[in-house]
Image (tube, rainbow, N blue to C red):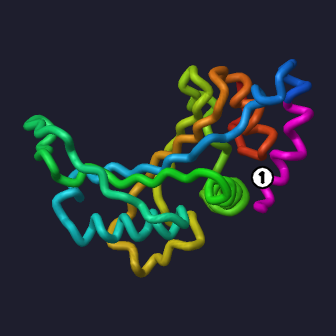
Amino acid sequence: MSRLREKYNSIAPTLKEELNIENVMNTPKLEKIVISVGAGEEGKDSKLIANMVDTITNIAGQKAVVTVAKKSVAGFKAREGAPSGIKVTLRGERMYNFLDKLISIALPRVKDFRGVPRKGFDGRGNYNFGLDEQLMFPEVDYDSIMKTHGMNIVIVTNTENDKEAFTLLEKLGMPFAKGRK
């Protein structure tokens, strides 16, 4: 069992009490984490896409998949069936391992890191934020990278309330930026 899952199990009763939740099944918990990368202009280069897939696979610990465009859009120079991005969905133990690695190893390695923004909640209890480059993760070998790229991370919770999701993530150790709530 991962360190973060053990931490969740220890804070769940206090979380239930603090948020005045009557049913234990309504206690906020993590459902999944989705890591995604937009291909953009790099979608035309199959070697670069393969390199990005390998990088995200190493970071997540699970095979990443290439997403393809469903329609052709001339304004975006997108062709139907052309690669448009890469994504991986983590659940269970891999989700907790990734979040633990993100909070305790990767984010502290960011230069001038002041915390993740508080405004990343979507109104339904999910938290979104972006990272500028993949080099902050220890699994990434700098010499094997063809091009640096960012990524978007979505943390999905079972609650419909941003306040409850914020409290859950804060108790798990997510380093939110200081400032107004």
From the viewer's side, name the closer residue of 83 and 137: 83
Q: Mark 1 points at which residue?
A: 5
Q: Tell me residue 115's x, y (percent).
A: 67, 43
Q: Tell me residue 158's x, y (percent).
A: 65, 31
Q: Please identify the quarter of the rendering in which residue 102 is found.
A: bottom right
Q: Is residue 38 above or below residue 155?
A: below
Query: Residue 60 lies in magenta, yes or no?
Result: no
**Screen quadrant of the C terminus:** top right
Which residue in the rendered view is the most extreme toward the left? 74
Q: Tell me residue 179's x, y (percent).
A: 72, 28
Around disc 1, counting alpha carbons within 10 Å, would you say few (fewer than 14), some (14 to 19), or many (20 or more)? some
The residue segment tinted magenta is 1-15
- Residue at image point 90% right, 35% down: 13
- Residue at image point 24% right, 49% down: 68
Q: Tell me residue 110's x, y (percent).
A: 60, 57
Q: Is residue 4 above or below residue 31?
A: below
From the viewer's side, name the closer residue of 113 and 181: 181
Q: Main secondary structure of the magenta part?
A: helix
In terms of secondary structure, where does tag 1 sit?
helix
Residue type at mark 1 is Arg
